[in-house]
Amino acid sequence: MQKSVEGFVKNFSEIEEMPMPGGSAIRWLITHKDGAPTFSMRLITVGKGKNTPYHSHDYEHEIFVVSGKCMVTLGNTEKIASEGDFIFIPPNLRHGMTATEDMKIICIVPIKAAKEILGE
Amino acid sequence: MQKSVEGFVKNFSEIEEMPMPGGSAIRWLITHKDGAPTFSMRLITVGKGKNTPYHSHDYEHEIFVVSGKCMVTLGNTEKIASEGDFIFIPPNLRHGMTATEDMKIICIVPIKAAKEILGE
């Protein structure tokens, strides 16, 4: 029998923070383990001078900068992103971010990515 | 020939705000029109005392409260959500929000929903 899926309200601080290479840290706020069928919401914090991995993958990111400021690498270009900005990273584009101020972002990925990274 | 898809950084204020029933307003930050394959990011603002539509649909929402505070209806329950909280609304759960302080939220939907609402 399929587990019934319930809606909820939680605070990001209730979710365990996991370190990432480069000195950033991630919280998986909503995943397939909560019954989300299509996409997964993560909160990533990056301290000033730290970075997220510079990498690419076959799925997209959609990012909203909740607070702080960073330099974003998108393929061969570099851009500044700060509070209130949003970032679209299409599949297979190399990307990374270096925080120039302590930064907090929401970063969405397809459930496929969440399952690859976290397991089923 | 398929249009090539580029990454970008933009500010939410660059995107046209569209009114919604109940006095809220929506900006579609990233959609299929930008080449997003799986999900769509929207920014919704709700002034104090205003609300989002009370409705249900066959797709999910994942919401992050960027600022402000609201009362969220999830089926037969009511909960408070404020800055730093996140909300999971599974498919087919009736939901709505009434702002108790001016509120700004990020709300993600599958691309299927973006296409239904905005057209192909």
Image: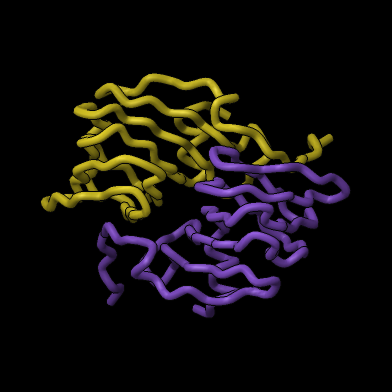
Chain colours: A purple, B yellow
Residue A10 picture quarter: bottom left
- The mark total stands at 0
Give the vertical position of A119 relative to B11 (above or below). below
Q: Position of residue A9 (x, y in %)?
A: 27, 57
Q: Residue at x 31, y 30 (%)?
A: B46
User: Which residue is drawn at the image coordinates 53% and 80% (left, top)?
Assistant: A119
Q: Is residue B3 above or below residue A101?
A: above
Q: Residue at the bottom extreme? A: A119
| Residue B87 horizontal/vertical position (percent) | 33, 53
Q: Which residue of the protein is positioned furthest toward the left in this rendering? A: B76
Query: Does A104 sit left or right of A93 as displayed?
Result: left
Which quadrant: the N terminus of chain A?
bottom left
On the image, the x and y values in percent for residue A80 come to: 72, 42
Q: Residue at x 70, y 62 (%)?
A: A49
Q: Nearer the viewer, residue A113 or B71?
A: B71
Please state the horizontal and vertical placement of residue A113, each as a whole percent of the image: 60, 66
Image vertical order of residue A62 relative to residue A1, above or below: above
Residue drawn at the location 38% of the way across and 62% of the way down? A12
Q: Nearer the viewer, residue B66 or B53?
A: B66
In the shown orientation, is residue B30 left or right of residue B86? right
